[in-house]
Image: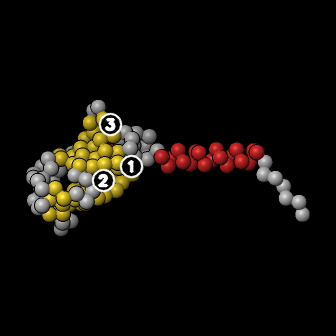
Amino acid sequence: MQKKPISRRVIALAATGLMAFSSLAAAHAHLQSSAPAAKAQVTTSPDALTLNFSEDIEAAFSGVNLLDNAQKPVETTKARVEADQKNRLIVGLSHPLKAGSYQVNWHVLSVDGHKTAGSYRFSVK
């Protein structure tokens, strides 16, 4: 039995499909950094949580829930996006945080319509 060679058309279609898929995967807003950082141990309460993403986000559809060590919500201000840096989400704290561990649950909608979410922890000494 003779094997048929793979045509250039099939290879081109496969390459195009892979490139399209990889660009879709890259289109999501991923958390790049935060303050306080994930797993950080800070000595004083921050005034706000700052989350930096890999692409611009929509403030109206993005937010943060902060939980204390007992998984109770901590009061924060409404999340906002900086006018000159639309990939930065800022959430003010209504009161200084007490010593303990905190969980940050975040969700964002990137400007191209993709939703992402995640969480991380930090502690105040």
Kind of residue at badge 1: His
Circle 2 — which element? strand
| Residue at the right extreme of this rendering | 1
- Marks 1/2 in contact by CB < 8 Å: the verdict is no
Relative image position of residue 77 (x, y in whole percent):
18, 46
First of labels 1, 2 by sequence position: 1
Circle 1 — which element? loop
- Work out which quarter of the rendered image holds the N terminus and state it: bottom right
Kind of residue at badge 2: Trp
Tell me if I can see residue 101 in this picture.
yes
| Residue at the top extreme of this rendering | 84
Q: Circle 1: is it few (<14), some (14-19), or many (20+) Cα within 10 Å?
A: some
Vertical position of residue 49 compared to residue 82: above or below: below
Q: Mark 2 points at which residue?
A: 106
- Marks 3/1 in contact by CB < 8 Å: the verdict is no
User: What is the distance, in whole Å, between disc 3 and disc 1 at their CAs?
Assistant: 13 Å
Q: Circle 3: is it few (<14), some (14-19), or many (20+) Cα within 10 Å?
A: some
Q: Mark 3 points at which residue?
A: 86
First of labels 3, 1 by sequence position: 1
Q: Name the residue under label 1.
A: 30
Labels 1, 2: front one? 1
Kind of residue at badge 3: Lys
Q: Circle 2: is it few (<14), some (14-19), or many (20+) Cα within 10 Å?
A: some
Q: Which of 35 and 48 is in front in this view?
A: 35
